Amino acid sequence: MGWVSGSGLFHTVLLVIGISNALACVQERRAARFTPGPYLDGGRLAPWESDADAWKRGAAGGAGSRPSRWARWRAGRAEARARREALARQRLQVEVDRILDKVRAEGMASLTARERATLEQASDAWRR
């Protein structure tokens, strides 16, 4: 009987311990953001030491803060798209050079419909 009546108090104490541990972890994580590390010479950095003008811009993370996962994903996609576009431009340039060599050697009448479309595509791309 004594255990049953005290179980509410027991659960409350466990809840308080869990919340205090969670808050301590959050506090340590925030403090670690401004620390050079346990093995480096020097003490803790103040939040303004990483970026002295952060308070003017309202920056919370300082200069060393890492972009969010979403921002890193979008940046990676943008880089991949830029690489694909650069590769496509390079392939188009090689194809145009080949077609122009053919025109120089054999004349415009020797071009196929596909080669003419490629030249038109390149012209439209370079006009933009």
Image: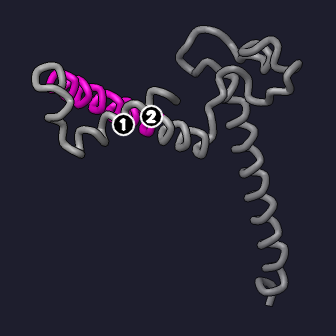
Residue ID at (80%, 16%): 48
Name the spot of residue 126 as percent of width and height, x first: 44, 27
Name the spot of residue 123 as percent of width and height, x first: 40, 30
In this rendering, the count of numbered labels is 2
Name the spot of residue 67 as percent of width and height, x first: 62, 34
Q: How is the image coloured?
A: one colour
The residue at which mark 1 appears reads as: 120
Q: Is residue 38 magenta?
A: no
Q: Secondary structure at mark 1?
A: helix
- Is 99 situated left or right of 121 in this image? left
User: Seen from this angle, which residue lies furthest top?
Assistant: 41
Amino acid under label 2? Asp
Disc 2 and disc 1: Cα gap in Å? Answer: 6 Å
User: Seen from this angle, which residue lies furthest front?
Assistant: 109
In the foreground, 109 or 93:
109
In the foreground, 128 or 14:
128
In the picture, the disc for residue 124 is 2
Question: Tags 2 and 1 in contact by the CB under 8 Å rule?
Answer: yes
- Is 73 situated left or right of 115 in this image? right
Q: Secondary structure at mark 2?
A: helix
Amino acid under label 1? Glu
User: In the rendered structure, which segment of residues is drawn in magenta?
Assistant: 79-102
- Is 47 situated left or right of 105 in this image? right
In the picture, the disc for residue 105 is none
Residue ID at (78%, 56%): 19
Residue 32: image quadrant is: top right
**Vertical comparison of 52 with 38: above or below:** above
Residue 112: image quadrant is: top left
Residue 118: image quadrant is: top left
Residue ID at (53%, 17%): 39
